[in-house]
Image (cartoon, rainbow, N blue to C red):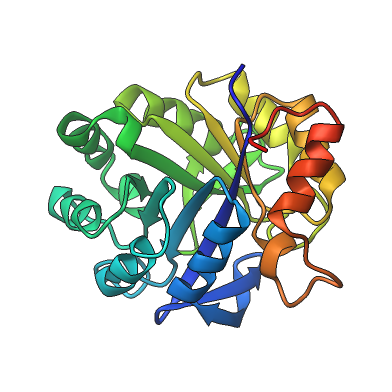
Amino acid sequence: MLTKRLIACFDIIGGRVTKAVQFQDNIDVAPAEELAGVMYDSGIDELIFYDVTASAEKRSIDIDTVKKVSQRVFIPFTVGGGIKDLEDMYRALKAGAEKISVDSMAVRNPQIIYDGARAFGSQCVVLSTQVKRTPDRSRFPSGYEVYIDGARQAAGMDAIEWIKRGQELGAGEICLNSIDNDGTLAGYDLNLMKLAEDSVTVPLIASGGAGEPEHLNRLFTETQAQAAIISSMLYSPRMKRNYTVSELKSWLLDKGINVRP
């Protein structure tokens, strides 16, 4: 049986990790490479790095910070933000990334998913999608719309239709970022994950809302998500207390959830 993965996600601004609520009001946390080392030493399974202002600022990803982080971790490391073409993908991989996350640029140019999968393999391409609930079922049958540029701009696309297309183009993994739940500590959007698992077959990562261990338990027992992003629980200044990775894994193992000890 495949183990469930716990992932630390870094929202990077100027080489530093920040923490936001619903993609806004980012609070500074720590230098990216410093926190990466702490997460690695604590036993985190994977790390995702988003240069969150790169797309909105129309610049390339912060390669210097990618290099610094990659020198501190020896686990799967995904990077995204400002990835415009195969050359950007290659530069990020050469700097130490194992997987590339495409988001806003993929919406603007879906061909980048196909090109990346063809050049580097589907296992290397993660489609990251920012989604928000909407009552407009006539335009968005799933009830979720895709957003881009750090959740600043509505894309006018149905979220579930988009991830289906992403899988067809070659994405080997999909990360669903709930804008509504992001940073709220109220739990994952389980309905969103269930809609996604009924529509695609590639591994799914849930992001947005985790605030206590029970949220992880519900995600892994009520949906088929293979991985969970748990950033706030690990290092958010807004938490009354932060958890350690070993605490979370021990708790999940006691609940019968198959995670790496």
Who is closer to the viewer here, 229 or 159?
229
- Name the spot of residue 202 as percent of width and height, x first: 47, 23
Q: Is residue 151 visible?
A: no
> At 55% from the left edge and 20% from the top edge, which residue is drawn?
199
Q: Position of residue 154 (x, y in %)?
A: 50, 56
Q: Is residue 25 above or below residue 200?
A: below
* Image quarter of the C terminus: top right
67 relative to 191, above or below: below
Q: What residue sits 68% from the left and 46% below the top?
A: 134
The answer to which of 252 and 194 lies nearer the viewer is 252
Residue at the (51%, 21%) spot, across then down: 200
In this view, the residue in front, 76 or 196, is 76
Q: Would you say residue 10 is visible in this rendering?
A: yes
Q: Residue at left 62%, top 16%?
A: 1
The part of the image, by quadrant, that contains residue 6 is top right
Left or right for 209, reference 171 = right
**Closest to the observer: 16 or 107?**
16
Q: What x and y, as percent, mark residue 248?
A: 77, 48
Whether residue 58 is situated above or below residue 163 in the rendered picture: below
Q: How many marks?
A: 0
List x then y, in percent, for residue 40. Answer: 53, 58
